[in-house]
């Protein structure tokens, strides 16, 4: 089969087998074309909980599929490629959080959603890149332990100066590959292009940005902006997606190294096998783990996240 034939087969099979396909923004364009919903991890989980289908297929990484299961325990949740993990999510575990709890007994512990379900059990709040600043401003406690991304944490610290932040040494290894030299080089090559970056990049890179925000925020900004040229400082798949969305505008990757190999593991054929009932991994969570991990997410929602 060619790509179009394979996509047609997937669309037919997902209808026959009552499957809702979620595609994270970093998935390839051919997977986007067969997805029911596209977006960031938490937004996809919310869409899945509202979807009528009884089976949810996550085209993304493991912690995202776990979040889908937390919000939709009654549904069958599949991860399209079982090997697709998240290096940031693997940097800390629940034991590490409990040690921080002893070290900072009066602090509120806030975890980025890019963490495992088991770790989430031990924290007070979970935040997304788009909701972090809003949530942090509303937390009554002054002292915040923010895990695991120190770059996102330092950006939040800049936006919420009335809090005392404790940051740990962690973060997205893909976004951390972007350097200040990359910015200078691309700015010299494309002097009229506006730089849009994800807050997971370093502070040295962020200081040059015209816009800092989540992946969906970057795409929305680029679509609505009157500017015609953009340098994109996040996973490079977003460059291609924006080229499809805005053919009248030019988009350039900030660094050729910004490729998430875990995201690119999932192929269109993986999606085909999963919707056909021949592939993917069923994601199951122990009830206690699910309920305890959901608690800090619910607290985020209560504050408008």
Image (spheres, grey):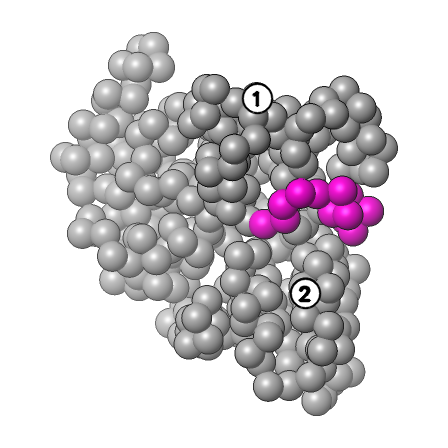
* Percent coordinates x, y for residue 198 in the rendering: 63, 46
Q: Residues within 10 Å of mark 1 (few under 14, many from 20)?
A: some
Q: Residues within 10 Å of mark 2 (few under 14, many from 20)?
A: some
The furthest residue to the bottom: 106
Instruction: State left or right for residue 163 relative to residue 219.
Output: right
Of residues 110 and 13, which is closer to you in this image? 110
Bounds of the magenta span?
202-213
* Percent coordinates x, y for residue 239 in the rendering: 56, 27
- Mark sitting on residue 250: 1
The furthest residue to the top: 2
Instruction: State left or right for residue 8 relative to residue 251.
Output: left
- Look at the image and tell me whether residue 20 can be seen: yes
In what quadrant of the picture does the N terminus appear? top left
Instruction: State left or right for residue 85 relative to residue 233.
Output: left
* Residue appearing at x 42%, y 76% in the figure: 302
- Mark sitting on residue 159: 2
Which numbered disc flags the more N-terminal residue, 1 or 2? 2
Instruction: State left or right for residue 128 relative to residue 3.
Output: right
Choose top left, top right, bottom left or bottom right for residue 176.
top right
């Amino acid at each position: 089969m060619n790509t179009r034939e394979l996509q047609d087969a997937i669309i037919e099979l997902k209808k026959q087998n009552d499957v809702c396909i979620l595609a994270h923004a970093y998935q390839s364009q051919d997977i986007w074309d067969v997805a029911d919903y596209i977006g960031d991890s938490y937004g996809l989980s919310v869409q899945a909980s509202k979807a009528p289908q009884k089976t949810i297929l996550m085209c993304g990484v493991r912690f995202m599929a776990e979040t889908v299961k937390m919000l939709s325990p009654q549904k069958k949740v599949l991860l399209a490629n079982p090997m697709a993990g998240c290096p940031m999510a693997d940097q800390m575990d629940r034991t590490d959080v409990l040690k921080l709890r002893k070290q900072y007994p009066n602090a509120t512990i806030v975890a980025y959603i890019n963490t495992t379900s088991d770790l989430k059990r031990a924290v007070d709040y979970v935040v997304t890149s788009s909701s972090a600043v809003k949530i942090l401003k509303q937390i009554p406690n002054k002292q915040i332990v923010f895990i695991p991304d120190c770059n996102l944490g330092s950006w939040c610290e800049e936006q919420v100066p009335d809090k005392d932040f404790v940051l740990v040494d962690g973060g997205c290894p893909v976004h951390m590959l972007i350097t200040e030299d990359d910015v200078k080089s691309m700015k010299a090559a494309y002097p009229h292009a506006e730089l849009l970056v994800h807050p997971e990049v370093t502070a040295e890179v962020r200081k040059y940005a015209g816009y800092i925000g989540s992946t969906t925020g970057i795409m929305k900004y680029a679509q609505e902006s009157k500017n015609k040229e953009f340098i994109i400082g996040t996973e490079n798949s977003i460059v291609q997606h924006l080229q499809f969305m805005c053919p009248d505008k030019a988009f350039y990757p900030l660094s050729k190294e910004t490729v998430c190999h875990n995201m690119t593991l999932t192929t269109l054929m993986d999606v085909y096998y999963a919707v056909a009932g021949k592939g993917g991994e069923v994601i199951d969570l122990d009830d206690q783990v699910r309920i305890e991990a959901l608690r800090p997410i619910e607290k985020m929602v209560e504050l408008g996240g």
